[in-house]
Amino acid sequence: MVADGPVWAVVVAAGSGERYGAPKQYERLGDRRVLDWSLAAARSVADGVVLVVSPGRGADPEPGADAVVVGGDTRSESVRAGLSAVPDDAAIVVVHDAARPVATPALFAAVVAAVRSGADGALPGVPVVDTVKRHADGVVVETLDRAALVAVQTPQAFRAAALRSAHAAGGEATDDGALVESAGGRVVVVPGEPANVKLTTPADLDRLAASL
Ligand code: CTP
Ligand code: MG
């Protein structure tokens, strides 16, 4: 099915930043806040942008967003809150972590293009440099084939109907690709950007500032 029609972005910014020690998406990076970079990059491909914020902030208007909604206790719940504000005529929805401020407009364009070409979903993946093992209670069960692995990022683009139906069951996952895959969707990998790190700890802020 070819996705032809408006593109909307959902930028999730409702996390509490436990590992960072503060709601990291509001930290200053260069001349603006972390989330402002994320909103601007999303805007480069989107006809509309929904920002999802934590309940404590209230849904006050934000420059750079067409709608602001309150998120939930988990990332998946926050995405669902964002989706509820995406108009029915959206053909493609791009989900992006506010905490990934240096994803480029070219990366947004690449995931959207892959969905326009027929995939149910597209996500950026970068090669894994470490050997990855699966363990149970500290005992190695399996060594995975590194060549077949990618570490995935956002933005992740989806055919809007595929994303909505994958979320309809209310599942939980650390990314949206996982829900669309489990629902039987065909999710493709596009080359990710090594610089596109997710702000997770304070040390990441320096790395991100260096790559601006
Ligand atoms: N997020 C969200 N709603 C949640 C949890 C996370 O919108 N209930 C968002 C975060 O704001 C972030 C993105 O999802 O932009 C990725 O989440 P993560 O990096 O885990 O951020 P936090 O959950 O805020 O950080 P931590 O896990 O350290 O608390
Ligand atoms: Mg989290």
Image: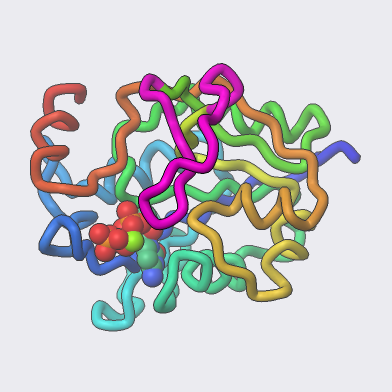
**Left or right for 98, reference 89:** left
Quadrant of ligand 2: it is bottom left
Using the rendered view, name the quadrant where residue 65 is placed: bottom left
Q: Position of residue 150 (x, y in %)?
A: 52, 28
Q: Residue at x 53, y 52 (%)?
A: 175
**Left or right for 37, reference 137:** left
Q: Position of residue 94 (x, y in %)?
A: 57, 46
What residue span does the magenta drawing correspond to? 129-149
Q: Position of residue 190 (x, y in %)?
A: 60, 24
Q: Is residue 31 visible?
A: yes
Q: Is residue 154 visible?
A: no
Residue 193 lies, with reference to residue 166, above or below; the image says above
Using the rendered view, name the quadrant where residue 164 is placed: bottom right
Residue 175 lies, with reference to residue 54, above or below; the image says above
Question: For residue 15: magenta?
Answer: no
Residue 90 lies, with reference to residue 86, above or below; the image says above
Given residues 126 and 84, the one toward you in this image is 126
Residue 208 lies, with reference to residue 7, above or below; the image says above
Given residues 51 and 182, the one toward you in this image is 182
Q: Position of residue 44 (x, y in %)?
A: 47, 35
Question: For residue 143: magenta?
Answer: yes
Task: Return the residue found at the far front.
Answer: 139
**Left or right for 20, reference 86:** left
**Left or right for 124, reference 117:** left
Q: Residue at x 45, y 65 (%)?
A: 75
What quarter of the picture does the C terminus occupy? top left
